[in-house]
Amino acid sequence: MTRIVAVANQKGGVGKTTSAVNFAAALAEEGNRVLVVDLDPQGNASTALGVEHRLGVVGTYEVLIDQKSVTDAIYPCPDLAGVWAIPATIDLAGAEIELVSTVAREYRLRRALESYLAETPDQVDVILIDCPPSLGLLTLNALVAAGEILIPIQCEYYALEGLGQLLKTVELVRAHLNPDIEVSAILLTMSDARTRLSAQVAEEVRAHFGEAVLATPIPRAVRLSEAPSYGQTVLTYDPGSAGAEAYRAAAREFAARGTSAPEPGPSAADEGTVAS
């Protein structure tokens, strides 16, 4: 059964897109067939995967407005065997406004993916949806379509600031739109083992989320920042780098645990900060 995973955090700059594309690459290395759905109008995931996303390219916008099917919008990633992508063009920026008055607007992506999987049930093993840094209609479509959520959290001050809002949104989606969704994994990003702050953040995140936190943190690394500018993930840009190895380890753990990770406890809904 295909796992559909929304990679979400309404805070920007937490390594969300970096995590989505590198998880895709790492999962593909393990023999999985992966589809990345770029739901961020900035199109950064499309860039990192080397997929064209200029104006006029068929992508997530056309899928959401029912102009094209998922099959029409899928492109193979040139440097990653086993990875495909649905790119995001600038047109996607206007999709939320266009969908406001439409019927069942929250279900557009879900229905499109369900149709695709019904037609080609053995095509992909994992679908990763890269969400925009907001809790608008695009992210809502991802949460309704997905069975699980991967939340990247940066190891920096105010790491948990605002996260309660995301978790409350997940609860509302579960109650009214998608009863099967769960937070399956928390990924610590931008970790610096040389600083006490990173250790404090990791400790607090684990106190909030328990076993849902993946054991491997992603380090702050120059190679991770450089790779997208070359249209690559870090696993192809510098396969032996610390960042590449960390994403491989985190992705293996994510794949092995399936959706069995426990939900965050009640305290996870409380917003918090980490003292310096």
Image (cartoon, rainbow, N blue to C red):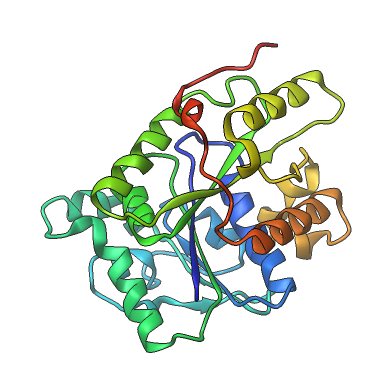
Q: Quadrant of residue 157?
A: top right
For the C terminus, the image quarter is top right
At 53% from the left and 79% from the top, the residue drawn is 124
Q: Say whether residue 252 is visible.
A: yes
Q: Is residue 276 left or right of residue 112?
A: right
Q: Say whether residue 62 is visible.
A: no
Front residue (pair 83, 253): 253
Residue 10 in the image: state x and y as whole percent: 44, 37
Q: Is residue 79 left or right of residue 37?
A: right
Residue 218 in the image: state x and y as whole percent: 74, 43
Q: State whether residue 155 is above or below residue 180.
A: above
Residue 22 in the image: state x and y as whole percent: 67, 58
At 66% from the left and 55% from the top, the residue drawn is 228
Residue 133 in the image: state x and y as whole percent: 45, 40
Count of numbered labels shown in the rendering = 0
Q: State whether residue 252 is above or below residue 94.
A: below
At 51% from the left and 33% from the top, the residue drawn is 265
Q: Quadrant of residue 117?
A: bottom left
Q: State whether residue 98 is above or below residue 54.
A: above
At 71% from the left and 29% from the top, the residue drawn is 202
Q: Is residue 254 left or right of residue 12?
A: right
